[in-house]
Image: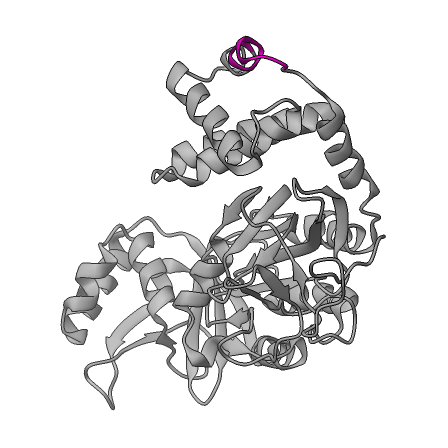
Amino acid sequence: MTQVQVLDGGPDRSGGYKVDVGRGQRIGRVSSEWFSRPADQRYLSLTELMAAVKGRAERSRTRTVESAAIRVEAHREDPERLALALPDADKPLAPTHWSFGQLASLVGAPAAYMRQLPAPLAAINLQYGLTSHRAEQVKTLETDDGRTELRAVTGPDYGRIYDHELVAAVQRIAGNGTGDTRWKVPGVLDWSTGVHNPMVDITSDTTTLYASDRDVFLFLVDDMNPIEAGKLPDGSPDLFFRGFYCWNSEVGAKTLGIASFYLRAVCQNRNLWGVEDFQEISIRHSKYAANRFAHEAAPALTRFADSSPQPFLNGIRAARQRIVARSDDDRTEFLRKRGFGKAETAKIVETVLAEEGRPPESVFDFVQGITAYARGKTQQDARLDLETRAKKLLDRVAA
């Protein structure tokens, strides 16, 4: 791996390096997480995050019960709260916002409407639904954290992967996530200079380690070791670094998933800029989910962390060297044969001309033009379609 820390041909005093974020994809998934997480869901290290989610799991238990055997009542001490009595439970359980929605869904009741009802009336309606609905076995997840809460109600074959299992898999490659290994919370792009600075203090504003009562989300990068993948039009290096994010919900709110990629920068709002080679796997919490996590997802994370960037570099190099158009007619024919309309073709060529100072010639030029054109699309489906087509074009050359 080429380790580069340069700015205009020399070391930058901040330890940062110049990047070109006008290329590749922009991905906003991490930014959405960053915007939506309150302070109590933000962690400054993997150690802190692990303590929270592991401690929660250790205070939890599961059981399988008949849905018709669940008893619902307004809480004796607080008539505005519901309490649930389960067979063999020592004391009533308080449903969380999430588990109440799962119970309502189980009996076909609109959860949003039920939440607006006074607790006694909601209890009567929910009890009627549980009693009259066809009896089913359900698996509960209960946690004692000062009061005993019902955190999840799922089917009996729900294959729970605990949040701490995912965090443990990340810790095996990333340590504390603060720079004790090459994997860390990302630095920040300075828009005024175009420099990505990897050396940024980890605070509640900059962290990318999150957990709530229903999920966990982590984003880490290797931005201290940028990779040179060719040259920019001005002759400066085109720099990337590796990154991944992963997510899970032990209560059934979402799948488990891991996305890996190369990127050029991360801004303060945690948008990912200049993303290339985006790969994603997800695992539904079905009966054999835990086995798939152990034999598929966790090893994939380790392989990516330990892998050489050479295949990625070879793919970029091959795409840059593959000249497919030398005239305007060639460019039009190349794009039209790949399903782009007349207007799209013109826009893609114009985009490359504006950003590169010349019309597209290589496969890499066209890929960058398509992804740049995609960034201007306001409709997500249209943007994803263009980015997928660009990736397939690049993959064919790299194969």
Residue 82, above or below 286: below
| Residue for point 18% across, 75% down | 119
Q: Is residue 328 magenta?
A: yes
Instruction: Choose top left, top right, bottom left or bottom right for residue 226.
Output: bottom right
| Residue for point 84% across, 53% down | 2
Q: Would residue 128 be found to the left or right of residue 194 on screen?
A: left
Q: Would residue 104 be found to the left or right of residue 202 on screen?
A: left
| Residue for point 67% across, 42% down | 232
The coloring applied to the image is one colour
| Percent coordinates x, y for residue 86 in the rendering | 40, 72
The answer to whether residue 65 is seen in the rendering is no
Instruction: Choose top left, top right, bottom left or bottom right for residue 245.
Output: bottom right
- Front-most of residues 314 and 49: 314
| Percent coordinates x, y for residue 394 in the rendering | 66, 29
Looking at the rendered image, the quarter that the C terminus falls into is: top right
| Percent coordinates x, y for residue 58 in the rendering | 61, 79
The answer to whether residue 386 is seen in the rendering is yes
- Front-most of residues 161 and 392: 392
| Residue for point 46% across, 72% down | 213
What residue range appears in magenta?
Answer: 326-333
Dominant secondary structure of the residues highlighted in magenta in the image: helix
| Percent coordinates x, y for residue 358 in the rendering | 57, 28
Q: Is residue 64 magenta?
A: no
